[in-house]
Image (spheres, coloured by chain):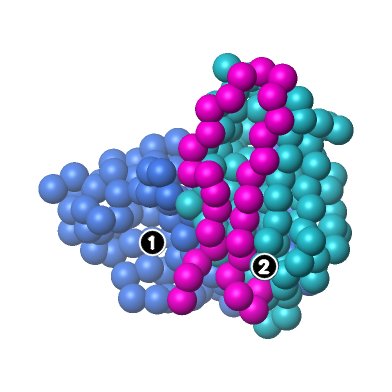
Amino acid sequence: DQQVKQNSPSLSVQEGRISILNCDYTNSMFDYFLWYKKYPAEGPTFLISISSIKDKNEDGRFTVFLNKSAKHLSLHIVPSQPGDSAVYFCAPGIQGAQKLVFGQGTRLTINP
Amino acid sequence: DAGVIQSPRHEVTEMGQEVTLRCKPISGHNSLFWYRQTMMRGLELLIYFNNNVPIDDSGMPEDRFSAKMPNASFSTLKIQPSEPRDSAVYFCASSRRQGGETQYFGPGTRLLVL
């Protein structure tokens, strides 16, 4: 039972363009959503989050959009930079329950 | 500030041997999580602790796996006996229980069981 799906295993984007990573979920109880970034041989690092009471959260080049009715969220990176090349995980959770459910990840490659 | 510390970073062992993975959470964090990452199953939660007490161990695959947290600054994940299918990267993460749900991950332990 896959509660969280990142349907694109990989994505390749030109430097300077926009990268859009998508995430779908099935559990309507999820009320906060985190994105993590992972480089090879390192642990995931927190990138940005959004609560279910919002539909957008922005932090510099990173913006996360949440569509609760569609149970869909997306991470926009603009402009994309070579250092953004990494695996990105979507990780929803339930406030107070502490457990996060991780998607399978999307490998983003930024081409110079 | 030091992040989550895990040791060893790499472990190679033979089937049947005992393996112990160690984790030191971020100071002041009172929740600790153990995850396993494999190609087939992705990143899955094994167990987590609040204030050194195990809260949910439903992700622990079987009785060969055990985890302890004897104090606020140290936790272990033990596999006994180890099997080749236990080969994976094991991550430890910590968070503050109140005031935020963000988990901060250690660098992981890459385990290979031959």
Does B26 appear above or below B18? below
Residue B73 is marked as: 2
What separation in Å lies between label 2 and label 1 (alpha carbons)? 37 Å
Chain bearing mark 1: A
Badge 2 element: loop
Quadrant of the image occupied by residue B30: bottom right
Badge 1 element: strand
Relative depth, front residue between A90 and B51: B51
Does A71 appear above or below B21? below
Q: Is residue A65 left or right of residue B23?
A: left
Can residue A7 be seen from the camera position used here? no
Chain bearing mark 2: B
Amino acid tagged 2:
Ser
Q: Position of residue B27 (x, y in %)?
A: 60, 75
Residue A105 is marked as: none
- Which stretch is magenta? B1-29
Amino acid tagged 1:
His
How many C-alpha atoms fall within 10 Å of the one at disc 1: few (<14), some, or many (≥20)?
some
- Identify which residue is drawn at 67% across, 40% down: B20
- Identify which residue is drawn at 54% across, 49% down: B7
Marks 2,1: beta carbons within 8 A: no
Chain letter of the cyan region: B
- Identify which residue is drawn at 84% across, 58% down: B54
- For the residues beneath circles 2 and 1, the answer to whether they share a chain is no
* Front label number (2 vs 1): 2
User: What residue did someone put label 1 on?
Assistant: A76
Q: Residue furthest bottom?
A: B99
Does A80 appear above or below B98? above
